[in-house]
Amino acid sequence: MKNSEKRGRKHKRQDASSAENAGGEVKEASANEASLPQSPEPVSASEANPSPSRRSRGRGKKRRLNNESEAGNQRTSSPERSRSRLHHSDTKNGDCSNGMIVSTTTESIPAAPSWETVVKVVPSMDAVVKVFCVHTEPNFSLPWQRKRQYSSGSSGFIIGGRRVLTNAHSVEHHTQVKLKKRGSDTKYLATVLAIGTECDIALLTVTDDEFWEGVSPVEFGDLPALQDAVTVVGYPIGGDTISVTSGVVSRMEILSYVHGSTELLGLQIDAAINSGNSGGPAFNDKGKCVGIAFQSLKHEDAENIGYVIPTPVIVHFIQDYEKHDKYTGFPVLGIEWQKMENPDLRKSMGMESHQKGVRIRRIEPTAPESQVLKPSDIILSFDGVNIANDGTVPFRHGERIGFSYLISQKYTGDSALVKVLRNKEILEFNIKLAIHKRLIPAHISGKPPSYFIVAGFVFTTVSVPYLRSEYGKEYEFDAPVKLLEKHLHAMAQSVDEQLVVVSQVLVSDINIGYEEIVNTQVVAFNGKPVKNLKGLAGMVENCEDEYMKFNLDYDQIVVLDTKTAKEATLDILTTHCIPSAMSDDLKTEERN
């Protein structure tokens, strides 16, 4: 569900320290580096996935020392002061160490306060674990192979049922995951049970019984209020031991989840969340977990702004897994809507003075609600909760939130009662909610990309990870305009529709003159529309015409002699060490 105001490019962005641009995946620092007087430079997860640098502030406590003269037993006129400071270990991370107390007196002074008296000890700190993951990402430019593997370190914590929670981006494209408990020198192999890319949460378990000995699971608390104190615990960059960062809840609203390309409820806190903190719990002052650290704001005008996944989203993920024995996702209302704040607009739509709601602009053709809802319907309420003209609903005392929050509390397959105003008539519909089918998917859920090769033309499908791989984190500015327009505004007309492009042309004598075609959509083949990659591969394989004609975007055409093109394909595959002319998923589907 999208608001018309959210279409287009965003100038302010939330970057998280993930393997791409959000989250906390970094190569772990060595023990020798952690012991040096100065902190090491931040280490990124890979050259293609740098961790954003951030500034964080260490805060010390002031302490007055009243000194008495032993001889005269007289108080000095101005008490000496000594200060215990937390020093910056590096301007790019928030690690700190206790400085020594300085005093001008020669008498004994009280001992420096221990760490436990400066920062309140969290009862469940022993349940916080360090996550070691080896990633092997797909290579979208060369989809028949994978990229070089790299390692990352992040955080996680133990919950009930012998399970561990962490961030989805912490174990994305994993080949091996290991966990280490606080104070232990043993790493335990872990199994990934579920990955919720949209909500950036992953569920793990460990089969070794020794891992679960002497550890109490973390308990979840209620959704915190504004200005409530929170303590983020994890293993951020700059050291190998556990780290504690304190702050308060400064904002609560529907946030953009960078890794999942979705919008869900989120907490903003003023505690720094550095690379490696991702997946760590955020505790309240009672030692209850109120969220999971997952991303931070990277901006020259922002400092110490972190974001936490709140308990309603976490509980939804866990219950979804327990209910379906897998992660099914967060359902959406497949519409685009418009605010109804203008009084003339409301009158023209036949709304009474007491009626409020939002106008439906467009409806996803693949969404179940497309069967009952129509453009220009006014949504008055969702499941009995009235929607305001700005698209918000009551949240808590003195707070309002976007009505997409109500939808996100549902599960895939659940029904919801939607009340609409159509031609001055109030109608009610019971709608079955489903996940969002995008023409350009936001992620590929760990699957390798599909591809098909003929005569050196590499055909593949477009996804957000593909655009990010081809054009970097700034793909919304650097990618071709035609692809961006479809990414931002196009809707899939069927559940199996894909955007097929010529990714590149592997140069050969057969394709002379076509070498510069890159990332251009394939519209039709021999006069037939191209619906998806499977359909294109089938048409090419079964083509018996003298020529193969590909209609591309920008009114380009590619014409190849059918017999010569198919014969040249094998030589091109051999030259470039490509094992097959098509990905395994296309071969499997064709055999079926």
Image: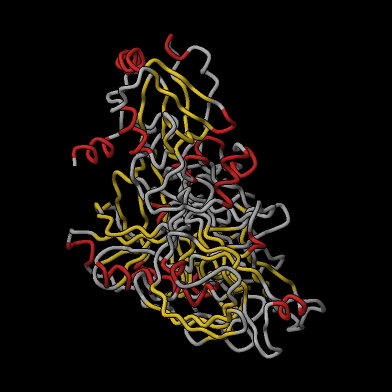
Q: Is residue 17 left or right of residue 323?
A: right
Regarding residue 307, the answer to whether it shows in the image is no
- Seen at 32% across and 62% down, the residue is 203
Q: Is residue 433 at least partly visible in the picture?
A: yes
Q: Nearer the viewer, residue 119 or 252?
A: 252
Q: Position of residue 169 (x, y in %)?
A: 42, 52
Residue situated in front as seen by the camera: 43 or 224: 224
- Against 500, residue 379 (above or below) is below
Residue 29 or residue 386, whichever sits in front: 386
Residue occupying the point 56% across, 38% down? 472
Q: Quadrant of residue 247?
A: bottom right
Quadrant of the rendering where the C terminus is positioned: top left
Give x and y (percent) for residue 39. 55, 46
User: In the image, is residue 98 above or below residue 185?
Assistant: below
Tell whether 413 sits left or right of 382: left
Mark count: 0
Whether 522 is drawn above or below 73: the answer is above
Find residue 468 and report its horizontal and vertical position in percent.
52, 41
Q: Where 96 sits versus 266, above or below?
A: above
